[in-house]
Each structure stands twice: as structure tokens, then as C-alpha cells.
Amino acid sequence: MMDRRFGGTATLLFAGMALALCAACSGEAPYEPAPQSIEAAPTDADEAAPAPEAADEAPHHDDDHHDDAHQDHDEHDAHAAGGEAHVHGAAELAVTQESNFVTVTVDAPLANYGLSEKTKKKATDLEKYADGLTELMGNARCDLVERSADLRRSGDHAALTLSIVWDCRRPSQLDGLMFTGFDTYSGFETVEAVFLGEAGETASATLTADSPFLPFGS
């Protein structure tokens, strides 16, 4: 009797344990959603502007700057006091005849005479540079009666105008003018010369060391 109850009880106990084991084996794990990949939010760097164009497509300014600087320098040297042309080596010469008097005017940079454009000399100190500058040609028997100098400054530039007045007893015998300044002052290269006679006759020429003569006449 005792064995049967024990057997039944044991049977029930093992059956309960088996059911519990089965329930544990067959139970489903709690649902957990699969992790989702999270994309990083775009940063300021990600939204930056597109990469710059290739370096060889970038504008080059070095040559332009060099050209501009060179142009500025040329323009600076091309002007002097009063805005007239100022080119070292060049000069302007005018000869006018009125009755017996012949006036020769030469305008040139100080550098043509071998002088610094920053010289402290006064205009009266520069009158002597008229010596050996020009020579009247012909048998006109001319005497020097006056000479003067006018010194003009503009910025770093300085120009000198020399005036020479001759009194000619026989002005009709004048043949022309020789610009001897090419031999006297090595700084002269070209001289734009013009002659205006009393009767309205004119002549003009570009004088050089190889061709320094300005003829008078129509």
C-alpha cells in the first residue's frame, strides 16, 4: 500500500518536473527589436563647398603686376614739369629769327648734361651749359648778346631750358644751325628741332649725332 502511493506520488512528481522542463525549453525569448544602424548627422565640414578648381585654372596675377609696374614706371618717366615730354637723352630745340636777332632755345632733362635731377644748383648757375651747345652756320657775323636758364622741377624730375640770343649783322647769310651738344654732352641722343623765320619760312628735323644740322629756309 505504501509502495503504490509512493510510486504514484513519484510518478506525479516526475511528470510535473517534465512539464516544467518542457515549458522552459519551449518558451520563446522576449522580443527585442534588432538594433538599427544610426547614421551620423552631417556636420558643417560635410556640407562644405565643393573643392576649388585646379591650381592651373586659378588666375595668375604676377605677370599682370609686373606689366602694370613696368607701365607705371614708363608713364612716370614720360612726364616732367608742366606735363611736357621728359625722356632722358631727348631734347627739343627751337630757333626763331626776328630782324637781326636769332634766339635759340633748348629744352632737355638735367640728366642730358650729366647733372643729377636732385641738384641744388640755381638756374643762374646753369647758364654756362649753353656753351658748346649750338653753333650758327653761315657768314652772318653773329655776336652772343644774352643767355639765360630756367630750371623746372616736378616730383623726381628736373628739366632745364637754355635760351641763347644772337645779334647777326647779316642775317640773310645764315645757313642753319649745328647742334654741337652731341659732342659736348654725351647724354644727348635725339633733338627735335624747328626753325621759324621772320618771313614765315619754316624747317624741322630730328637731329642725331650722325645728323646734327638744322637748315634754315622754306
Image (spheres, rainbow, N blue to C red):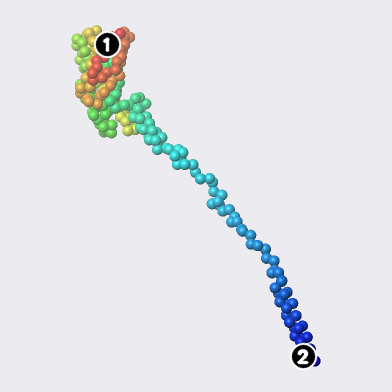
Task: Tell me which numbered mark, 2 or 1, is placed earlier along the sequence.
Answer: 2
Q: CA distance from mark 2 to mark 1?
A: 167 Å
**Is residue 102 at least partly visible in the picture?**
no
Instruction: Kindly give the residue lying farthest to the bottom in the view shown.
Output: 2
Q: Quadrant of residue 162?
A: top left
* Residue type at numbered disc 1: Phe
Instruction: Give the image location of residue 141, x and y in percent.
Output: 19, 11
Q: Position of residue 88 (x, y in %)?
A: 29, 27
Residue of label 2: 3
**Crowd rating for badge 2 (residues with CA inside 10 Å; few <14, some 14–19, many 20+):** few
Above/below status of 8 relative to 54? below
Residue at mark 1: 216
In the image, is residue 42 above or below residue 210? below
Identify the residue at image location x=41%, y=35%: 64
Tag 2: amino acid: Asp
**Residue 192, x across and y down, in percent:** 30, 19
Determine which quarter of the picture holds residue 150.
Answer: top left
Q: Is residue 32 left or right of residue 124?
A: right
Q: Nearer the viewer, residue 68 or 49?
A: 49
Q: Is residue 46 left or right of residue 67?
A: right
Q: Foreground: 116 or 11? A: 11
The residue closer to the viewer here, 109 or 30, is 30
